[in-house]
Each structure stands twice: as structure tokens, then as C-alpha cells.
Amino acid sequence: DQQVKQNSPSLSVQEGRISILNCDYTNSMFDYFLWYKKYPAEGPTFLISISSIKDKNEDGRFTVFLNKSAKHLSLHIVPSQPGDSAVYFCAVGYEKLTFGTGTRLTIIP
Amino acid sequence: DAMVIQNPRYQVTQFGKPVTLSCSQTLNHNVMYWYQQKSSQAPKLLFHYYDKDFNNEADTPDNFQSRRPNTSFCFLDIRSPGLGDAAMYLCATRDDQGGRTQYFGPGTRLLVL
């Protein structure tokens, strides 16, 4: 029973355009949400997070949106750059994280 | 730079031969985690230490053990590796006083022959 779902295994976006990655969760008790980026043969790198008291958090080109009623989380990257090509994982929790299965983002030059 | 270090990056072992993976950190974080990630799957938490307190996940096989001799080091022991244990093993740390974010090492890819 997957508590965190990333329904798009892959996404291709033109350089300079917006990349939108989506994540759905099932447990309304979750109150902290994170996005990690992972390059091949490396560990996940923390990108951005949001707590349930907010609905938006920005950090440079990265913005995370939280829709609690829909139990939906999204990551917007704008403008997309070739170095953004990686696998993106959403994760929920605090003491222990539950991860989605990831979305492979490819930025096309 | 403060970081999470995992050694070795690649480990090959034989079916049934015990293997130990190591993780060290210079962040001085009090919480350390071990995750298993198989191809195209989400990282799965095996166990974590809150200071010296060991917390095992209910579905972590007994074949997997861990030691944390001090704040900086944590080891993952696989007593009798099976073919199904081939995976990437990720170590992560968190400062319980400073935040809610886990920071990951580069991982050790384990191959079982």
C-alpha cells in the first residue's frame, strides 16, 4: 500500500521552460514534505521542503506547492536547466521519511 | 565541508558471506538512518538510531543488523546476503535539535554473486 505516489515515472521538458513534478499522498496526518534530487550513483540531495502550515515555499528557481485538501504536492522548476536532469523524489514525514518512487526529469537543450 | 560519507561506494560479496557497510558523518547529527533502495523503487527505511537508541522497522529482516559505536559512525551488517539483498544502501543523518531534514550520503551499491 503506497502512501506516497509519483505517478509519472519520467518527464521531458525543453530548457528554459517550466518543469512540474507531482506527488500524491494518502495520510492526512503527514505534516512535513520534502523534495530530493538524485543523480546516478549518488545519494539524494535535499532540495526544498514545506510544512503543512504553508501552501507554498520558494527557493530560487524551485517552488513547492502543497494542496492539503487534495493531498497533493508539486515541485515547479523555472526556468529548467540541463543540470536539472535527475530523478526527483518526494518524501513525507518527520522522524521517518516515506518516499515516492521518483520521477526522472530530462531537460532537453 | 560537513558531510555524510559512505564506504565503500561499491561492494561485491558472495551469497551467504557476511558484509559490513559503513557510514560516517561530520555533521554531528544525533539521528542516523539506513535505507535500502532497489532499482526503480523508493528508498525503504531499514532502521535508525536516535542517539544510541536503536529503532528497527517492523519489516526489516533479521539478516540486517546495525551498530553505532559513537555519534560519527554507523555500520550496516548483512549476516548472510542473498541475491535479493543486492541494492543501493543509503545512510542519512538528521539533527533533531536543528531541523526536520535528512541529509544523505552517496550510497553503497551492493552486488551479491
Image (spheres, coloured by chain):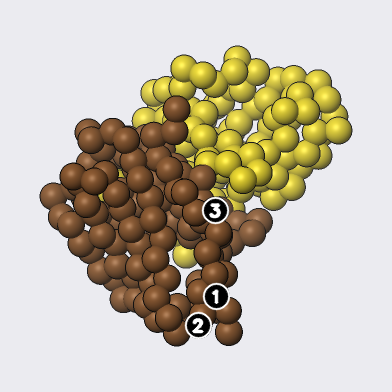
Chain colours: A brown, B yellow
Helix, strand or loop status at disc 2: loop
**Image quadrant where residue B16 sits:** top right
What residue did someone put label 3 on?
A9
**Labelled pair 3, 2 in contact (Cβ < 8 Å):** no
**Residue B112 horizontal/vertical position (percent):** 80, 33
Residue type for callout 1: Ile
Residue on which disc 1 sits: A107
Q: Place residue A31 in its image quadrant.
A: top left
Q: Distance of mark 3 from mark 2, alpha carbons?
A: 19 Å
Q: Dot 1, how many residues are within 10 Å of its Cα: few (below 14), some (14-19), or many (20+)?
A: many
- Nearer the N terminus, badge 1 or badge 3? 3
Q: Position of residue B7 (x, y in %)?
A: 66, 46
Is residue B49 or residue A5 the one in the foreground?
A: A5
Residue A17 is at least partly visible in this image: yes
Viewer-nearest residue: A28 or A70:
A70
Q: Is residue B26 visible?
A: no
Which residue shows up at 41% across the image and 60% down it?
A21
| Residue matched to label 2 | A15
Q: To which chain does the residue with label 1 belong?
A: A
- Callout 2: few (<14), some (14-19), or many (20+) C-alpha neighbours within 10 Å? some
Q: Amino acid at mark 2?
A: Glu
Marks 2 and 1: in contact by CB < 8 Å? yes
Badge 3 amino acid: Pro
| Disc 1 with disc 2 on a shared chain | yes
Marks 3 and 2 belong to one chain: yes
| Label 3 chain ID | A
